[in-house]
Image: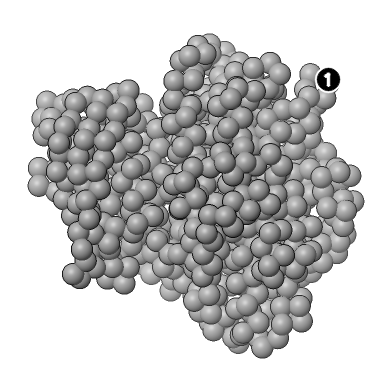
Amino acid sequence: MPGGGPIHVELERIDHCRWRIPRAYRPDMRVDGLVYADDVLIEAIRSDQSLVQVANVATLPGIVGHSLAMPDIHWGYGFCIGGVAATDPDVGGVISPGGVGYDINCGVRLIRTDLTEADVRPRLETLVNTLFATVPCGVGQGGRFKFKKPDLRRILTSGSRWVVERDLGDPEDVDVTEGGGRIDGADADAVSDRALERGEDQCGTLGSGNHFLEVQVIDEVFYPEAATVLGLQRGQVTVMIHSGSRGLGYQVCEDALKLLRGVPDRLGIRLPDRQLACAPVHSSEGRQYLAAMRAAANFAWTNRQIMTHLAREAFSKVFERSPNALGMRLIYDVAHNIAKIERHQVGGELRDVCVHRKGATRAFPPGHPEIPPAYREIGQPVLIPGDMGRASYVLVGQPGAMAQTFGSTCHGAGRRMSRSAAIKAARGRSIQRELADRGIIARARGRTGLEEEQPDAYKDVNDVTRVVEEAGLSRRVCRLRPIGVIKG
Amino acid sequence: MHGTDESDRGESIRFGAVQCEMFAHTADIGLRVTAPEETSLLEGAARGMLWCIGDLIAAPGAELRTRRVELSAADRAELLRDWLAELLYFVDHDRVTLERIEFRELSPGRVRADWIVAPYDPEASRLRREIKAVTYHALRVEPTREGWCAEVIFDI
């Protein structure tokens, strides 16, 4: 029986930040695994079962290139968190809901302000309390906005633009959201009534777990030219929102996994993990999942858009100025749990492949046509949340990502401690007080949220972002230090 | 079953003859349930999942409702997962907690039961975390010398 602890996987070192899991590790692997990590991070990665999951993904039909793992990988379900896999639909390549996860289009957005820490610090507690009261968060928390099914269906096909047109955002917000806040091919009819019911009052809610809203200060700029293009500078206050598609997305994944039962057996696909259930992209089941997954992704972009509106409202109330007067402009919004059909070089020719990013961020390089025109010269912004005590990062995509990882990079710091271990480690301590001692005001709805999500539960995001920069996947622009945190 | 060394173990609770214990998973939470028979395994797993979410306290004077559940699956493990996923849907959408279960039929791939549920009071309840989903990863239901043991990992 596999245990909960590490399973040894023999790695071949390629260079200081790349490791290979050779196909020889398991006869059913179709491609090598490729793991991005330095000497420190690889030890954390070896301590759980994520490397086995990288090998498991390498068995999926139609996988091309490598089964990829970013430096923030950790043990997930099916795919590891931090995994990237591309499959070629024209050679029987599959799509796997496990390669996207239950929280479809979980992602991050960053909003800038004209405020500095000196402006915010005297009113920080009021600001955090106001945000906590304004942005619904926590288990079972419905939102201020309730959408009946006809409107929900419009959101599922139109994405965040639909609510922006109803005064829940600025038109420019859509321009700087990945894909314009919408993915083509979404079909509301592919989404079950149950999923719609779960979404009715959850659009505009944060949720719990690792989701958060943070008030941050830019404390270091590494790439000034890119920071200038993005409108970011040292000392500036920003707001970061991390959330996804809430119950609607979870139900879409749940429904898909039931739909796919029996498909692998029928097609003679042997899976090392039931959670890797899959179907060829070109099959009816594959197409149905893609259509529903895209609809859930559109819901997630809308969810983050509504929370942006609520955050602007809270800032406006506390600072008694309009969001525009506060310079609250959206910098970017990225998905990090999604599957997309994208054109990439495979074996020397351009192919349309299905790129699964499960806890990984798209990182297209400068000049890519899918980057908003205002940012095209610097590369696609990449938003990397760290932990609530240390830092988060803004990076931009680099050419190495297209060459090595199907235009992908890491998505966060990555957990290094289980939730149980984090709760044990927090016994006798007040994480809230410890954060306050570091100048960070935190509010959490759940009883164990701060304990499970304490900074020590995560790898050091500074290490993770350094590795993706050294590997040429993305380049650090600036670091963001948290000063206010709200969690579910 | 999953590693049972001390470092793997989290909090535990008993519901009569049923033992529920959280076990370590890096990103999510595992639940291990041991029970003397299959009905108590299913009931214990349901109560164990709600315990992972928090202390869900029924609203005072809340009217009890009956949810009839009929599920079929390929094997015991899949049936257990479906059972929990169905309950999770009602907890998330209807915001109810489980008062009791009345089993009508249970066979290795099929269950029919009535869940007697009541709306929970969000103010009085002490919620710990949201469970997004009941995963298939490392899902197990196995007979033991004492009865049955199940393991399931929840996406948090």
Give the residue at x 85% y 64%.
Answer: A228
Residue B55 position by quadrant: bottom left
In the image, residue A210 sits, relative to residue A15, either above or below, namely below
Q: Along the line of sight, which residue is nearer the eye, A477 or B44?
A: B44
Q: How many labels does the image show?
A: 1
Give the residue at x 70% y 86%.
Answer: A321
In the image, residue A359 sits, relative to residue A19, either above or below, namely below
Q: Which colour scheme is used?
A: one colour
Give the residue at x 65% y 42%.
Answer: A186
Image coordinates for residue A470, horizontal then vertical, percent = 74, 42
* Amino acid carrying mark 1 in the image: Gly
Which residue appears farthest toward the front when viewing the image?
A150
Q: Along the line of sight, which residue is nearer the eye, A291 or A326?
A: A291
* Left or right: A117 as drawn, with respect to A261: right
Crowdedness near tag 1: few (<14), some (14–19) or many (≥20) residues, C-alpha within 10 Å: few
Quadrant for the N terminus of chain A in the image: top left
Image coordinates for residue A390, horizontal then vertical, percent = 58, 62
Give the residue at x 68% y 52%.
Answer: A158
Residue A69 position by quadrant: top right
Helix, strand or loop at disc 1?
Answer: loop
Circle 1 chain: A
Determine if residue A391 is in view: no
Image coordinates for residue A407, horizontal then vertical, percent = 75, 38
In the image, residue A67 sits, relative to residue A119, either above or below, namely above
In the image, residue A164 sits, relative to residue A397, either above or below, namely below
Image coordinates for residue A307, horizontal then vertical, percent = 60, 66
* Left or right: B27 as drawn, with respect to A388: left
Residue A85 position by quadrant: top right
* Left or right: B76 as drawn, with respect to A24: left
Residue hosting label 1? A348
